Amino acid sequence: MSVSLSNTCLPLRTDSVPQKPLVLNGVVRFHLQRSSHVSSYRFGFNSNPFFRTHTPRFSKCSPQRVSDKRRETQVTTEQEEEEEVVEFQRLFSNLNRSTLKRESGSLSSAIFLVAGTTVGAGILAIPAVTQESGFLASAVACILCWAFMVVTGLLVAEVNVNTMSELGSGGVSLVSMAKRTLGSFGVQVASWSYILIHYTLLVAYIARSSGILTNFLGIPIWESATLFSLVLGGICFFGSQRFIGATNGVLVFGLIASFAALVTVASGDLHWEALLKANFEAVPMSIPIIALSFVYQNVVPVLCTDLEGDLPKVRTAIVLGTAIPLGLFLVWNAVILGSFPDTGVSAERMIDPLQQLRSTSVTVGPFVEAFSLIAIATSYIGFVLGLTDFFSDLLKLQTRQNKPFLYLLTLVPPLVLSLLDPEIFFKALDFAGTYGVLVLFGILPAAMSWSDRYVVSSSTATQLVPGGKVTLSLVMGAAGYVIVSEIIENFSKYLSVS
């Protein structure tokens, strides 16, 4: 059928296309209106780096003379527009400003980053705080703490992606997440807790690594601490994202290799019957350090940005990246506690079995030193990257122009504090685990998710953790219970001494 056309043109409606993407059920959903006559859309990626919807204007030329019935049908059809959903797994594209090419983070690098950040100085302290409870009871505690920390990490990820989607910018830190969901009070809690735990753990890492380097190189403590901070801090400062990921991957492989060698050498005198010991009453005193050993949530915002908000990849990186350390922790604890079954220690008189193992065997000593140093190095890199990004967001500083200042603010204070008290390792870990980790990465993620789901975003919020309000209440209740119990115990000890 042919019709004659004139120059009369009717513009199509384009104002119904939403300007902001919605993130629902792990995908980015753009709601588009499709007309039955003309439908066209395209998405452009730019350095924002979020999607921007470019909707070109179309004109539809109609016959000047049409029947009333056909005109009525046409108007009705144009008004009856149906909604179409276009789904994307990732939220935006990481573009190299120089080459204008997409540089997406790889899943393997993300897994190594999580695993490397998790395996730090905490693994060295686990046998010392689990001797009284025994391997069987401490294994149950490790698995429960792992599950708890996986849940809180996923909560951080879901709030981070929702915040990036709403603000339209990548690289969102805990400060922006807390401000959006909990207001100024949440910002204060997140800021001080974040700075407390990062400075405390960096102090512990430098103190322990400087002792190892001093024994190996025969140089003073202050030189060892400065050398460790300069080398690893320099890698973070000068290295690109790809170089840091490759370095972290090499360190994780070295960590696994040294761990395997250490376990092989040390397991020769293993007392298998000692692994059946279970004193569940002594488990609570080990929870802060065990929970501290699974800290990785500080790199989750970096992870979400590197993986372009791809929630399935983020979930996989968190679960697999923490499952590797869980296996290492269980095997490590079994070997150390099985080698020294009759220490007869109590919580008041803690002895480091790792030092005992190193002193009783000339062969095991070098493996202990290598494993300890690599474990600290992998975690140190993750914490330095997380803290610099945090300061950049907190102080509203551009990372490129203020990079030297940000790294000085991150590296120098922990170095100075570690030199003031080289024996601060266990005290710093226990303090950070109780009052830093369980607040920052226990109560706060659940509180932000609660506000994000039921106050700020309502049904449009991405949810990675099922269970609704029950799960969030259990997370906050468990963390609060441990904190209150630790405060009461410490206060009781203070009263008995005085």
Image: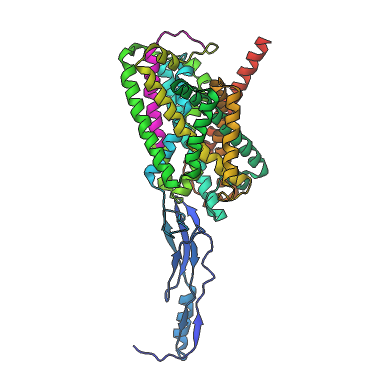
**Relative horizontal placement of residue 334, taking residue 442 as reference (left or right):** left
Above/below status of 450 relative to 100: above
Residue 176 at x, y percent in the picture: 59, 47
Question: Could you say which quadrant of the image residue 446 lies in?
Answer: top right
Residue 326 visible in this rendered orientation of the protein: yes
**Relative horizontal placement of residue 154, taking residue 412 as reference (left or right):** left
Nearest the viewer among 336 and 496 is 336
Nearest the viewer among 329 and 149 is 329
Nearest the viewer among 99 and 234 is 234
Residue 348 at x, y percent in the picture: 55, 12
Main SS type for the magenta part?
Answer: helix
Above/below status of 217 relative to 407: above
Above/below status of 352 relative to 474: above
The residue lying at 44 percent from left, 27 percent from top is 373
Residue 24 at x, y percent in the picture: 47, 52
Boundaries of the magenta span:
321-346
Quarter that holds the N terminus: bottom left
Q: Is residue 342 magenta?
A: yes
